[in-house]
Image: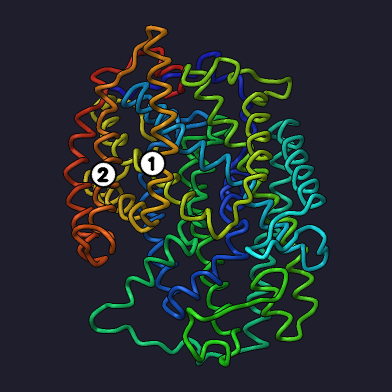
Amino acid sequence: MAAPQITATRAQKGLKRQLGLWSMTLAVVTGTIGSGWLFAPYLCAKAAGPFSMLAWLLGGLMSFVIAIVFAELGAVVTTSGALAAIPLLTHGRTSGFIGGWSVWIAYVSIPTIEVLAMMEYLASKVPWLIVDTGHGQILSGSGMGCAIAMLGIFGWINLSGVGFLSKWIDGLTFWKLTIPLLVSVTLMLKQSHWGNMDGRLPWDGSVRDEVLTAVSAGGVLFSLLGFRTSLDLAGEAKNPQRDVPLSMGLGLGICLGIYMILQLAFIVSIDPTQIVHGWKKLVLTSHGGPLVAIALGAGLVWVANLLLLDAALSPGATAMAYMGVSARVSWMMGLRELLPKCFQDLNKQSVPWVGLVSSMLIGIAMLFGGPSWQKIVGFLTATSVIALAIGPISLMALRKQLPYVLRPFRLRGASVWCRVAFVMATWAILWSGKTSAIWAVGSIMVPTTLFLILQWQHGRDLDLQNGLWWILYLGGLIVILCLTDKDGRYPMNIREQMILSALFALTIFPIAVASRLKMISKMELEAMAV
């Protein structure tokens, strides 16, 4: 039987397809290299010392495995806001809301975190941006005004249209690729404390806890999950079937290489006297961030100034990108009536303006909560990975639901890869820590409960039985974390936790696949350009 292709209807035609492979790849890069490169090397080094290089390799492997699963999905479901569309397509409205809401929560938080990172670095030159309360540093009144203004500017650029946004991204991403490499090479040539790399992996593998901490709380996964940006812009790609998978792979490979070079440079640039009591005792107190502290300690004032300039540009470009893709997610959810219908409205530039303005206003509101980059990275990692955990399940579901739909990219051995990806996603949630995981699950399940009540009151289909596996999965993870935590009733080491959670994930996987919709309506197929 010939493989059918279904064209997009008026809903999908609302967005303009203007982005080529280069712009899509640069969108992945700019969504990946943001504030992470300013903070993650320091946090990883504190957690794992020279073994933080292993953390980047492990995080890169996990991101790659998850990305190749989404490579096939992204070549099939070519609508903007695909991370919300995919669970809706395969498992119905309840699952669609959970998947869409979890990724939206992560996306809408990132611009705020990026702006806070900008403020922290720039405060070394403009000290009135922050004040010290004695319990930590927070934005001053003037700093708050500057942060709000920045979010407003990012919103205005996004409202001008995806073509205008891509020009900003293309220009800023070249800068973002160049500066980390220049800083890394300069620090390695100036400092060159290669003895800092000495470290032997214990035969009992006891260093694994530190490496896994670096992967989650150290910001490795948070920094590398930017490949998803390509999925959320798929509805505006000229050739999404080819460009979505390629841009994810190219962007992820480029960014992993840059992060590993930067981590190596950070380790060998530390004065050995600062780590005589161990990497965990490393403290870089210079106002303006850890890399600025190293540069100033080495007498590289021009590097410090360059870092401060980059602190205004790199996080800013990432904030712009995620503000835009968060609007695309809410647009898709509004289109399918998972959010109020007003979220599907487009302005004259074909931009989902209601979702964009909402994301901007929520980002501004979050500034008043005073979160820090270090404190929120675990929460954002957990919510992001929860959103991605549906991918392996949806891929196997779509293989059964739509066996004859054209797949420009088809993942070989998908049954094995999907199970491995689902286990790795489960581990990533586990490693984010009990507190982060509980907050992430709570921020998803409370709105889901309200959504179900409102949908039931309006007499709409819930597809509840198709989404119950989410409750079983997320609830089971919280139980495992609470019982096996060091303060739990049955404390386990990380190896035992990984084995238990892997068995749990492999048990949930076939249940979740079997919970798929038996039939996908033609209207849903056309609306999502499958």
Disc 1/disc 2 C-alpha distance (Å): 28 Å
Residue situated in front as seen by the camera: 518 or 124? 124
Pick the quarter of the image with the N terminus.
top left
Q: Residue at x 61, y 29 (%)?
A: 17
Mark 2 surroundings: few (<14), some (14-19) or many (≥20) residues within 10 A: some
Q: Earlier in the sequence, mark 1 or mark 2?
A: 2
- Outermost front residue: 134
Asked if residue 516 is positioned above or below residue 494 in the image, the reply reads above
Q: Which structural element holds mark 1?
A: helix
Q: Amino acid at mark 2?
A: Ala
Q: Which structural element holds mark 2?
A: helix
Can you identify the residue that label 2 sits on? 414
Q: Where is residue 448 drawn, in percent x and y?
A: 40, 28
Direction from residue 460 to residue 473 in the image, left or right = left
Q: Where is residue 300 drawn, in percent x and y?
A: 76, 82
Label number found at residue 335: none
Label pair 1/2, CB-CB below 8 angstroms: no
Coloring applied to the structure: rainbow
Q: Residue at x 63, y 17 (%)?
A: 345
Q: Amino acid at mark 1?
A: Val
Residue 265 visible from this viewpoint: no
Residue 324 visible from this viewpoint: yes
Q: Residue at x 44, y 89 (%)?
A: 198
Mark 1 surroundings: few (<14), some (14-19) or many (≥20) residues within 10 A: many
Direction from residue 434 to residue 497 in the image, left or right = left
Q: Residue at x 53, y 78 (%)?
A: 264
Direction from residue 424 to residue 104 in the image, left or right = right
Pick the quarter of the image with the C terminus.
top left
Asked if residue 41 is positioned above or below residue 416 in the image, the reply reads below
Q: Where is residue 71 drawn, in percent x and y?
A: 41, 43
Can you identify the residue that label 1 sits on? 441
